């Protein structure tokens, strides 16, 4: 054992996951290191530096096509990192759908990464990446489908200007899973949960109806809104007449959207709103897991 190996054991670095290991939590991969979280919409690039203690810093953004915005801001964004490591949230050109009777064999979510056909059967498409969330009470599942070529192009766009990519996710999918986790803490037939989930992330909107633990309807669209929140309420208003009287709203946004709650209260009169949105929420979730 040489001195470098001995030093790595004494300071515990030998036991830390590699920085490019996406299965490990972000904080364990980059302890005491500044990194950056970047969100991409169709016409917007946003970013938050992550401090050495793992806390999201000030939110910044630029309205432009992401490649153009990155060209203009690359030096500033890279200055927020120690070694150029970043996490990316892609918020356009994906599909979130509600499926039934997908395979639930042990380790299905891991198998999905290497052999998606075995899990999806006839729903499998070449050139796609997938993520899956099963409803533990029914045979329904939420399926995220993303174009492989789009992911590779985005990764290349950041790598070409000197970034090192540690994680890629879909913001709306992450936030929807967060909302489901927060509201479905007590599962089982004795305490079934009903809620209308509304997720907003970098212009994308996802809505899920859960009635007595059952996932009944899901609608997902990208590029719905820019700076105005009215299109969000207009898109979702038709759900009001289809919701059971006891179903209230769970709202979660990657960043709080001014005026959205008021718009939803007008579109869904008489329904309470549990707002889980908070500054830096998505970046914080990405850093935690």
Image: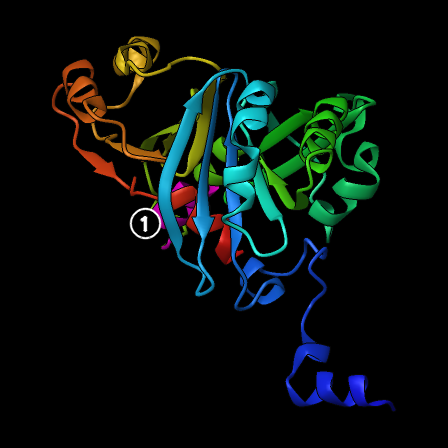
- What residue is shown with label 1? 191
Q: In the image, residue 18 lies at what x, y percent?
A: 72, 64
Which residue is outermost to the left? 270
Compared to residue 229, the image places residue 196 above or below, namely below
Q: Quadrant of residue 97?
A: top right
Q: Say few, some or many: other residues with alpha carbon within 10 Å of mark 1 (under 14 / 14 to 19 / 20 or more).
A: few
> Tag 1, which secondary structure?
loop
Q: Nearer the viewer, residue 285 or 10?
A: 10
Q: Is residue 162 magenta?
A: no
**Which quarter of the picture shows residue 225?**
top left
24 left or right, relative to 246: right
Above or below 284: residue 272: above
What's drawn in magenta, residue-wise? 177-185
Can you tell which quarter of the image residue 124 is in? top right
Residue 236 vs residue 2, the one in the foreground: 2
110 up-or-down from 227: above or below: below
Q: Residue at x 80, y 90 (%)?
A: 3
């Amino acid at each position: 054992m040489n001195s470098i190996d001995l030093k790595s054991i004494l300071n515990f670095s030998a036991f830390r996951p590699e920085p490019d290991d996406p299965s490990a939590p972000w904080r364990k991969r980059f302890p005491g290191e500044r990194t950056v979280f970047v969100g991409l919409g169709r016409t917007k690039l946003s970013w938050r530096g992550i401090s050495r203690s793992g806390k999201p810093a000030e939110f910044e953004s630029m309205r432009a096509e992401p490649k153009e915005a990155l060209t203009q801001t690359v030096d500033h964004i890279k200055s927020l990192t120690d070694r150029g490591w970043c996490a990316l949230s892609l918020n356009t050109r994906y599909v979130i759908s509600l499926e039934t009777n997908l395979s639930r064999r042990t380790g299905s979510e891991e198998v999905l990464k290497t052999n998606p056909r075995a899990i999806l059967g006839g729903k499998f498409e070449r050139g796609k990446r997938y993520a899956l969330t099963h409803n533990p009470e029914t045979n329904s599942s939420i399926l995220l489908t993303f174009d492989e070529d789009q992911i590779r192009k985005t990764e290349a766009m950041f790598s070409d200007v000197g970034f090192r990519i540690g994680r890629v996710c879909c913001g709306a999918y992450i936030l929807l899973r967060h909302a489901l986790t927060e509201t479905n803490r007590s599962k089982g037939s004795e305490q079934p949960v009903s809620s209308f989930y509304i997720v907003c992330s970098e212009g994308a909107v996802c809505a899920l109806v859960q009635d007595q633990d059952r996932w009944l309807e899901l609608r997902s669209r990208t590029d719905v809104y820019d700076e105005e929140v009215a299109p969000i309420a207009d898109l979702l208003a038709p759900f009001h007449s289809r919701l059971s009287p006891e179903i209230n709203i769970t709202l979660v946004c990657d960043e709080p959207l001014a005026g959205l709650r008021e718009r939803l209260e007008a579109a869904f009169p008489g329904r309470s709103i549990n707002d889980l949105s908070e500054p830096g929420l998505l970046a914080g979730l990405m850093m935690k897991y």
